[in-house]
């Protein structure tokens, strides 16, 4: 509770900042004192009227000194009520700083007194900013789709810990002002609902983005959001096949039509729907999306993506730390098309298969006894049985 004494510039009033903090927008008008809290930006503004007398500069400075004493006396209550730690207090007259003092705590609080000439009063603002001693955690949200348990978990942690929220251009969420003691319980609640920190997500998924497309958008001519999980899995499988490491990635953007709502024309690899189960392939954007991609191929069927998405030559011929987008620009599209036409895939070494053919001991012993009569082992006989069974079903022969 913050007490404003009945002095020359204050009316007697009690203002509970803790109660105001739980309200989206609250205003208490006490004739000369107005306290307003804006939830989104954590602003508490206390406005007090001052007569604007010409030639009474010393009186106004005296009032400022009273404000300084008042805030110093009640700084503990302010910090406890607002959840703020380290504070920087500034008193301004016009644009000139009158008094500056620090309150040593753990977060960031700015107190500002300024002159509103057109309304003829002073304004004292308590502005809660992102605290330097707090953490900001970003959450990966697949294609920006929050529903069900995710929505419930987000609401729980935001309301419980009074967190600020930032939405990113890549359809992710940043929760700010997280104290160190809160990080573990918040992470646990969110991870149980499927909202993970980026370090726990496949790097391909972190930068990938799509538009909703089918069945929500009437302009869509092929899949995007519903199809991207399978496409990313196929890209990851291709990475593994050519020997690219897990932490390597390309920026993938997919849209269901040429309108490009997910910004595929700035991606390293953009897939733009141009027909049913068909895409234009765009290449050459940069990983930080500061350059424009160019059309590489049209009418590539979904089932034929691997023919275009072979990254073997990127791995073999790229320069040090060269991104996929920069590599395609440097090499040129004509050269890339030559590689694709000649590419048959990396040589696959022969693999030994250890098949478990027997599920129980009795079956194995019976097969082993029968095999010994034919001077074979149980495994050889079992393989003959399996081959004969397959041949019978395929060809109708024994």
Image (tube, rainbow, N blue to C red):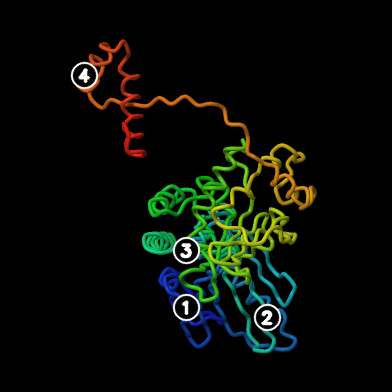
Q: Position of residue 125 (x, y in %)?
A: 59, 73
Question: Which disc, if any, is residue 5?
Answer: none
Of marks 3 and 1, the one in the foreground? 3
Q: Earlier in the sequence, mark 2 or mark 1?
A: 1
Question: Which disc, if any, is residue 366?
Answer: 4
Q: Position of residue 394 (x, y in %)?
A: 36, 39
Q: Position of residue 256 (x, y in %)?
A: 56, 67
Using the numbered discs, state the Cα–Cα distance from disc 2 to disc 1 in whole angstroms: 24 Å
Left or right of residue 353: residue 109: right
Q: Secondary structure at mark 3?
A: loop
Residue, far left: 362
Does the residue at mark 1 contact the one at mark 4 (Cβ under 8 Å)?
A: no
Q: What residue is disc 3 on?
A: 145
Of marks 1 and 4, the one in the foreground? 4
Does the residue at mark 2 contact the one at mark 4 (Cβ under 8 Å)?
A: no
Residue 345, picture quadrant: top right
Of marks 3 and 2, the one in the foreground? 3
Q: Earlier in the sequence, mark 3 or mark 2?
A: 2
Q: Earlier in the sequence, mark 1 or mark 4?
A: 1
Q: Earlier in the sequence, mark 2 or mark 4?
A: 2
Q: What residue is disc 2 on?
A: 115
Task: Give the answer, above or below, for where 147 lies relative to 125.
Answer: above
């Amino acid at each position: 509770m913050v007490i404003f004494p009945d002095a020359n510039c204050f009316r007697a009033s009690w203002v509970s900042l803790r109660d105001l903090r739980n309200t989206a927008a609250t205003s208490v008008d006490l004739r000369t004192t107005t306290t307003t809290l804006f939830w989104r930006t954590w602003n508490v503004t206390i406005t007090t009227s001052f007569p604007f007398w010409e030639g009474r500069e010393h009186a106004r400075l005296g009032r400022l000194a009273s404000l300084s004493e008042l805030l110093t006396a009640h700084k503990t209550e302010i910090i406890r009520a607002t959840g703020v730690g380290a504070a920087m207090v500034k008193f301004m007259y016009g644009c000139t700083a009158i008094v500056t003092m620090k309150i040593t705590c753990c977060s960031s609080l700015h107190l500002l007194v300024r002159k509103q000439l057109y309304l003829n009063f002073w304004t004292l603002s308590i502005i809660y900013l992102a605290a330097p001693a707090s953490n900001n955690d970003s959450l990966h949200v697949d294609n920006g789709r929050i529903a069900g348990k995710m929505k419930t978990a987000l609401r729980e942690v935001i309301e419980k810990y009074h967190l600020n929220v930032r939405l990113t251009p890549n359809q992710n969420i940043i929760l700010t002002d997280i104290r160190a003691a809160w990080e573990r319980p918040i992470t646990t609640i969110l991870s149980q609902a499927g909202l993970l920190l980026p370090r726990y997500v496949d790097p391909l998924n972190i930068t990938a983005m799509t538009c909703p497309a089918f069945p929500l958008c009437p302009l869509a001519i092929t899949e995007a959001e519903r199809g991207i999980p399978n496409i990313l899995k196929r890209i990851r499988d291709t990475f593994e096949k050519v020997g690219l490491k897990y932490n390597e990635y390309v920026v993938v953007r997919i849209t269901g039509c040429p309108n490009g709502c997910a910004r595929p024309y700035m991606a390293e690899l953009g897939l733009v729907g141009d027909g049913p189960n068909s895409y234009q392939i765009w290449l050459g954007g940069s990983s930080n999306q500061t350059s424009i991609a160019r059309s590489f191929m049209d009418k590539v069927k979904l089932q034929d993506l691997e023919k275009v998405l072979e990254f073997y030559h990127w791995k073999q011929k790229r320069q040090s730390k060269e991104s996929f987008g920069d590599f395609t620009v440097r090499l040129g599209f004509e050269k890339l098309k030559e590689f694709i036409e000649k590419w048959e895939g990396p040589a696959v070494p022969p693999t030994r298969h250890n098949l478990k053919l027997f599920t129980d001991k009795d079956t194995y012993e019976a097969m082993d006894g029968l095999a010994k009569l034919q001077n074979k082992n149980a495994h050889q006989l079992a393989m003959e049985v399996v081959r004969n069974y397959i041949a019978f079903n395929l060809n109708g022969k024994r």
